[in-house]
Amino acid sequence: MITRPLTLRGYTLPCSSFLSSLLFFAAPLALIACSETPAPIADETTDARAVDVTVEELSMQVWRGSIQTFGVIEALEEVNVAAELSGTVQAIHVNEGDSVEAGQLLLELDPQKRQLASLQATQEVNRTSASLAEAQSRLQRRRSLSEQNTISEEVLDNAQLSLNAAEATHQQALASQKLAERELKDTRIFSPTAGLVDVKAVEAGEAVAVGASLITLQAIKGLRVHTWVSEADIRHIRAGGKARVFTAGLPDHEFQASIEWVGVSADPNTGNFPVKLILTDETDVLRPGMTATAVLEGINIPDVLLLPESALVDRDRRRVVFIVEQNGLESVARIREPLLVAGFGHRLQILDGMTPGDLVVTSGHERLLEGTVVSIQSRD
């Protein structure tokens, strides 16, 4: 067999040397090809770590909730002192904010006209009294003459009629005297109750008409708190229930109260319902207009299944919860979308979709998906 030399890039090699050279170049190429083969991808599931979570076991329970609201202290009774007669204000003896006792003099109207009217009425009483006495004496004389048959029956009857008229005139004069004395007395206006002067509506020298408001009093012997409760909470309170009241001025002092009245119509602007509380403690240190925090004790509701708000999480625009179920030797997370209702403080009532004994995840659910392996941690 004849072999011909092979020329390679300027080198002349025999054919027998070509095979050796080919092997010389192919070996490194094979090594290079082997070194570029990708390494096998590790199975991530074989090295997955369980997600740490804390859970709470659901159980039927009695809800004894309380509702915290904010309100204002107001007088149990607001008294508007009005003018019972017209006149000019002569003197005012109190200022706004003053504390007054029942029967204390508040202001005086000019009494001069009423004094003159009273004097005139007294003089009229004296005149009619004299006329009455004269009519009685005349009738007595006419009776004596009638017994002697010296006068006619008609004269005696006329004397009796004159006496009756004198008596009527005298009674009218007495009534006018009493009215004049009452009006004179009414020029001095006294407080009908103990309280605080809230509004002083007039000044000295000012003319007032009958019925005009003079002074507004807030009775401090009885105080209440006017507050508002949301529509979610209103169904849990009843009139007669207990409450505790705190004020900013006395943060460490707790005042006892009772629920006096629960509104039946919500405010159209806020949707909240009005509630009034009667303060049952001593309230001498409180004043109408103070702000207050009220804690209302709700009614007890037995056999409710409650979910903590911390268990809720958003998934695909849905509010869901995760519970933990046992899958063989592993604990796994399962999604539930229960039917809930609010109005139990920081918990929600479960109406459907979960049962007592479920282990609901309360923390760590941010990393959970359906079927995620979890590790339950103790809540220290």
Image: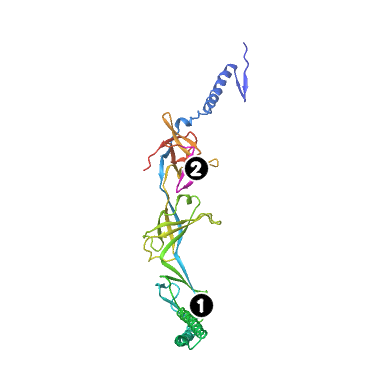
Where is residue 293, by image quadrant? bottom left
Where is residue 107, by image quadrant? bottom left
Quadrant the N terminus occupies? top right
> Callout 2: 10 Å neighbours few (<14), some, many (20+)?
some
Q: Residue drawn at (58%, 19%), measured in percent from left and top? A: 18
Give the image location of residue 100, x and y in percent.
41, 73
Let me know if residue 290 is in the magenta part.
Answer: no
What is the magenta segment's predominant secondary structure? strand
Residue carrying label 2: 340
Which amino acid type is marked by label 1?
A: Leu
For the magenta stretch, what is the residue range?
Answer: 340-354
Residue carrying label 1: 85
- Tell me: residue 162, above or below residue 94: below
Q: Secondary structure at mark 2?
A: strand
Q: Residue drawn at (38%, 62%), measured in percent from left and top? A: 250
Foreground of the two, 109 or 8? 109
Foreground of the two, 186 or 231? 186
Let me know if residue 346 is in the magenta part.
Answer: yes
Q: Can the viewer see residue 119 in this picture?
A: no
Foreground of the two, 30 or 305? 305
**Disc nearest the viewer among 2 and 1:** 1
Give the image location of residue 226, x and y in percent.
46, 60
